[in-house]
Image (tube, grey):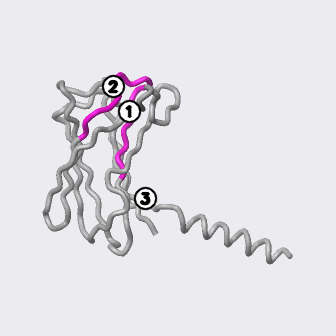
């Protein structure tokens, strides 16, 4: 009986661990105490893909002060692949839904928002560089605590 229970528990843990995504890369940059993301302060994230047989999610992380004053913010990306090709794209990062409710997970005065900017894509082996900047109409985007990027391999 004990053997069956141990086998069942081991099987469940194996299934859970196989279904979770593995973070291949994770970096988060904090802004100074002023919490301002200047337009001139593009953030660069360099990572390497070693396994081209799986798919990946590329997730942008945006941390802001609670009760953010904007419903959305424009974020620009440039993704450079190992062969030197550059893909430029912009997202309108939704901070609040149509009713004004914040979409981020908040704890106290800090809210963390994540969004997949590339979902379930194949990436060739090699070095990648993703640069993120904001195109807010002003010299800086206020009340931003930090931004980051995570690359998750899927099995």
Residue count near mark 1 (Cα–Cα under 10 Å), binned few <14, some 14–19, many ≥20: many
- Which quadrant: the N terminus? bottom right
Residue assigned mark 1: 95
Q: Nearer the viewer, mark 2 or mark 3?
A: 2
Q: Main secondary structure of the magenta part?
A: strand
- Residue drawn at 20 percent across, 40 percent down: 42
- Residue drawn at 60 percent across, 64 percent down: 16
- Alpha carbon of mark 1 to alpha carbon of mark 3: how far? 24 Å
Quadrant of res 104: top left
Whole-percent x, y for residue 7 in the image: 73, 75
Provide the secondary structure element on which disc 3 rests: strand
Position of residue 48 in the picture relative to residue 7 (left or right): left
Residues tagged 1 and 3 counted as in contact (Cβ below 8 A): no
- Alpha carbon of mark 2 to alpha carbon of mark 3: how far? 30 Å
Camera-side residue of 136 and 22: 136
- Residue drawn at 43 percent across, 59 percent down: 23
Q: Which residues are magenta?
A: 59-75
Is 144 covered by the magenta stretch? no
| Image height of 23 relative to 148, above or below | below
Residue assigned mark 3: 23
Is 64 covered by the magenta stretch? yes
Residue assigned mark 2: 70
Q: Earlier in the sequence, mark 2 or mark 3?
A: 3
- Residue drawn at 32 percent across, 73 percent down: 52
């Amino acid at each position: 009986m004990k053997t069956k229970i141990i086998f069942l528990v081991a099987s469940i843990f194996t299934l859970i661990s196989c279904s979770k995504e593995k973070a291949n890369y994770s970096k988060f940059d904090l802004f100074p105490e002023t919490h301002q993301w200047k337009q001139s302060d593009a953030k660069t994230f360099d990572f390497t893909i070693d396994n081209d047989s799986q798919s990946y999610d590329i997730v942008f992380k945006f941390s802001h002060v609670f009760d953010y004053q904007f419903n959305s913010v424009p974020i620009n990306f440039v993704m450079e692949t190992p062969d030197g090709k550059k893909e430029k794209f912009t997202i309108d990062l939704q901070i609040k839904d149509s009713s004004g409710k914040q979409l981020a997970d908040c704890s106290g005065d800090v809210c963390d928002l994540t969004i997949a900017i590339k979902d379930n894509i194949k990436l060739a082996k090699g070095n990648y560089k993703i640069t993120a900047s904001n195109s807010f109409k002003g010299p800086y985007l206020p009340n931003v605590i930090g931004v980051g990027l995570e690359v998750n391999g899927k099995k």
